[in-house]
Image (cartoon, rainbow, N blue to C red):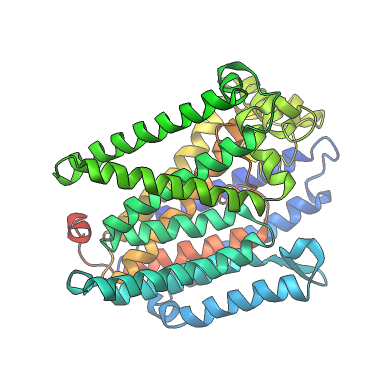
Amino acid sequence: MKKNSIFLPLLTVTILSVIGLIFIFSAFYYKSTSFFANTFVIKELFFILLGILLFVFIANIDYRIFKNLSFILYISGIIILVLSMVIFRTYRGRWIKLGIISFQTSEFMKFGFLLYFAHFISRHFERSVTLNILEYSMVFFKTLMITFIPMILVLKQPDLGTSFVFAAIWIIFLFFFRATGFIVSLYVILFGIVIGVVFFISSEITEIRGLFGFLLNMNFIKYITLFFAILLFSMLLNIVIAFLFGQRINILFTILLIMLFFVGLFLAKGVISHLKQYQKNRIITFVNPSYDIRGSGWNVIQSKIAIGSGRVKGKGLFKGTQNKFNFLPERHTDFIFSLISEEWGFYGAFLVIFLEFLLLFYLLFVAFKANDAFGLFFALGSFTLFFMHIVANIGMNLGVMPVTGIPLPFISYGGSFYLISIFILGINVNIFKQSHEVRRLDLFIK
């Protein structure tokens, strides 16, 4: 057992939590300068203290106990999601509120899903090389169902950002399950869906200017442009695959990729029909934030102003004008990174990114030092979950990704995600404690 294995993640989480607490206080400093008069700060302080105690406790519990409980936790998560929509109709089904206690149902589902999926895929991992095509397809179908059920329920809440997290974990697990052919097909289809959603929604907006808007407003040219974009993408992907796997470039494979891309475009129409109007507005804002300056584009524009105005050293703690004059929205949750960048500048933003990515590298180290397949896949899933949250949150603050409402781990205000993140990280510490030797990456991807 490694006695000091808890020190690095505990120190990193503590520093991030303190930074988050400082800027949650800063977010409401213009209303009250008293630390203990701010209910958000008091609640977050409670979650931090409780979380640190839980972290130390969970890090010393054998992770195999959670492995054995994974199916129960997964089913419990499904039941909670259903109950939140059927019985608890407040908060758009995303929260269950019982008196003074409330929690976000999708956060608990993340934990149950990650545990059970890691358990399921680890049971088939060791014999994945010997599986025939029928057995392999059955495993693939089961993983699809394990992922698809919570994704649909979370989308109904609606919570598009969390559903992407489920999909990302599924793809990563399949990659390490040696499902290369499935993964390439999925990537092409998903790329087609994303391009199709952005393209079809944006093409309805005539106010988009510039070269992109010009092409969109000319029906004939836009479809010709899309066709050549598909062809170019398929050829480039074929070349990359041939280079990585030492295969010859196959024209038939390029044609297959084009067909799969069109499947994605076809599915995009179905995706759009299920999107709420505010979700469509977010996509439009992503393409052109100035389209609706006082509406859907307001958050992104003000966030970018806050980040840019902070420059290198920042304006100083509690001195951010975007914060002080209430221009920056949701600055204690979704856009807290913008507040940090405004008041602490590039130095503060770099510190946060460095600490977040330090946790990511720790999780990768845990993954390739795990004793068993469950430890490997749970750590990889944990890495994917945190990576998606970090990149999506910082990306939407910078305006390079659509606004999805995903919090920044251990920084953004919120008890549900904070405690679930503590649970996940604590289990990873125990996996590392019980590891013996470093595994080589090529053992898992051959």
Residue 393 visible to an observer of this rendering: yes
x, y (%) of residue 173? Answer: 36, 61
Extreme-right residue of the structure:
31
Q: Quadrant of residue 19?
A: top right
Q: Which residue is drawn at 66% across and 23% down?
A: 208
x 25%, y 46%: residue:
253
Q: As rendered, which of 243 and 3 lies closer to the eye?
A: 243
Of residues 212 and 266, the one nearer the viewer is 266
- Judged left or right of residue 222, residue 404 is right
Q: Residue 374's x, y, as percent? A: 34, 71
23 or 144: nearer the eye? Answer: 144
Q: Is residue 13 left or right of residue 62?
A: right
Q: In which quarter of the image is the N terminus?
A: bottom left
Q: Quadrant of the C terminus?
A: bottom left
Image vertical order of residue 79 relative to residue 50, above or below: below
Q: Residue at x 64, y 38 (%)?
A: 201
Q: Quadrant of residue 312?
A: top right
Q: Is 131 situated above or below 181?
A: below
Name the residue at 45% across, 77% down. 66
Q: Is residue 156 above or below residue 117?
A: above
Is residue 432 visible to us here?
A: no
Coordinates of residue 168 in the picture (x, y in percent): 45, 55
The residue sitting at the front extreme is: 220
**Marker count (numbered):** 0
Q: Position of residue 187 (x, y in %)?
A: 39, 49
Q: Is residue 148 left or right of residue 257?
A: right
